[in-house]
Amino acid sequence: MADGYLEKRYEEVFGRGARKTVVRHASLESIMEKNRSYRGYQKDFEVKREMLERIVAVNAKIASAKNQQALRFKLVTRDTGADFIVQNIKLGGLLPELHLPFPDTEPNAFIIICGTVPENKFVDIDLGIAAQSMLLKATEMGLNGIMIGAFNKAKITEAFQLPYEPLLLLAIGKGCETIKLQPVDEGEKLAYYRDEHGVQYVPKIRWEQLLIP
């Protein structure tokens, strides 16, 4: 190809002097570092159904134990019952004195993950893969979230007329907290905690110590 061909074609399309835009995608590692469990969200940011649909869409591409694909998803926004879910969940089990989420920081969108077959180890494998993949997608989109296992299954099943058992909830929104990873040695305390400024620290065992000699 002749020297300067691409530059000349660029100028023909975008005009002389136009600046080239280089699109840089976040690395998987950086997305994983940002993918923290948020228990407080910006009240003025509303998560739309279309955003939740993009997040759930990753399930058509991820792995599934025995390829059974037994999970189904109910999308809930501010207009379709998010407030009801907030009343039937518990957040911050290790910080009960804070009564999280704080007023006006409640999430306004959820994904209810249900199982179409009785829960077993293969369903649980899929559940972990799906939940993590969806939260990574949310993070890539500039959103935040958290997995919620402490919720009133009976009330949520009835309220949303779910045909399947709800196994896990994902809250989705724009986080309004500061969360930092704290490297620790094996044997140290692993409970997350907050300092006097409200910064939450999440202890993580150094990866080298996760290896079996």
Image (tube, rainbow, N blue to C red):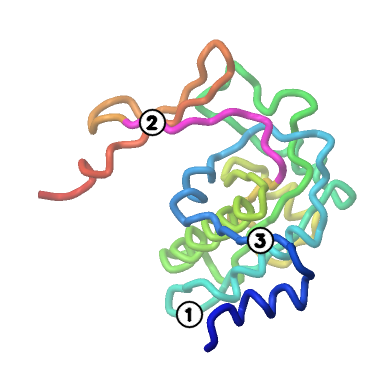
Q: Is residue 79 above or below residue 102?
A: below
In the image, is residue 117 part of the stretch drawn in magenta? Answer: no
Along the horizontal axis of the image, is 58 left or right of 94?
Answer: right
CA gap between label 3 and label 2 equals 39 Å
Dot 2 corresponds to which residue? 203
Circle 3: element type = loop
Give the magenta-colored segment's residue range.
173-183
From this viewpoint, is residue 159 visible? no
Dot 3 corresponds to which residue? 21
Residue at 53% x, 81% y is 3
Circle 2: element type = strand
Identify the disc placed on residue 67. 1
Near mark 2 (Cα within 10 A), the count class, few <14, some 14-19 or many ≥20, is: some
Quick one: label 3 or label 2, which is nearer the N terminus? 3
Q: Which residue sits furthest bottom?
A: 1
Quick one: label 2 or label 1, which is nearer the N terminus? 1
